[in-house]
Amino acid sequence: MASLDAELNIEAANADFFRHVARPSREICGQSIYDVLHPSARNILPKHFSHLSDGHGSRFVERVVAKRGHDRVFSTELTGIAVRGEGDTISGVVVLMTPDDDLSEAAPAPEPAPLLTALDARILEGVATGASTIQMASRLYLSRQGVEYHVGLMLRRFKAPNRAALVSRAYSMGVFTVGSWPPRALPDFVK
C-alpha cells in the first residue's frame, strides 16, 4: 500500500510495497507512482486517476505491470482509492498493489528485454498489424528474403515458434504500447 498526494507522488508506503518494488523509501518517496510502474501504465492509469479527481468515482481496479528494482517486472492488480479533503476535493490517493507472484518463492529473474534495431522494430510492428512479407518488403525497401531473415532472427530471440506467438510474446514483455493502433514498439526496447 502507498499513499499518493494530489499530484500522484508517493508520500509514504508500507514495508510490503517497498519489498515488492525492491527499492528503499529514500529512493521512492517523493517520486511519481509512474516511476515504479512499467511505461505501459501511462497509457491506462491517467484516465482512472482523472476520473477520481473529477469525482466520477471513489475507486478503480486495473491490472498493470510494475517494476521490481530497475531491471525486473511483475504483474499486479492496482486499486486506487480517492481520499477526499474539505469541500469534497481530492487530497490524495491510496494505492493497493496485489502482485500475482509470491516473493517468498524464489522466482528466477526474467530474461532481459531483447533490444531491437530500428529495422527490427518496424518489422515487428508490421507483423503485429498483419502485414504480409511482400507488403513489409516494399514499405521498408528490402527483399522478401531480407524481411524473412529479420523475422527469423526475432523468432529465435523471443523464443517464439511462429509470428502469432512472436507478437503475443512482444505484447507480454511490454515491447508494444498498450491500447493503441497500429502497435508501436516503445523506445526503451529499440537500440
Image (tube, rainbow, N blue to C red):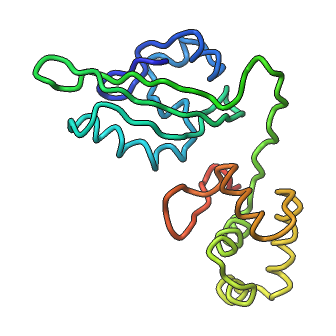
Task: From the viewer's perspective, tell me whether residue 55 is left or right of residue 68.
Answer: left
Splitting the image into 4 quarters, where does residue 84 fall?
A: top left
**Residue drawn at x 53%, y 11% as measured from the top left:** 26
Residue 164: % across, % down:
75, 69
For this rendering, which residue is in front, 99 or 149?
99
Residue 80: % across, % down:
40, 30
- How many labels, in total? 0
For this rendering, which residue is in front, 153 or 18?
18
For this rendering, which residue is in front, 148 or 60?
60
Splitting the image into 4 quarters, where does residue 18 fall?
A: top right
Is 129 rendered above or below residue 167?
Answer: below
Is 20 rendered above or below residue 114?
Answer: above
Task: From the viewer's perspective, tell me whether residue 139 is left or right of residue 57.
Answer: right
Task: From the viewer's perspective, tell me whether residue 84 is left or right of residue 9.
Answer: left
Furthest residue toward left: 87
Residue 36: % across, % down:
55, 30
**Residue drawn at x 65%, y 70% as measured from the top left:** 128
**Residue drawn at x 65%, y 78% as measured from the top left:** 130
Is 28 rendered above or below residue 189?
Answer: above
**Residue drawn at x 74%, y 56% as measured from the top left:** 169
Residue 63: % across, % down:
54, 40
Splitting the image into 4 quarters, where does residue 111 fall?
A: top right
Q: Quadrant of the C terminus?
A: bottom right
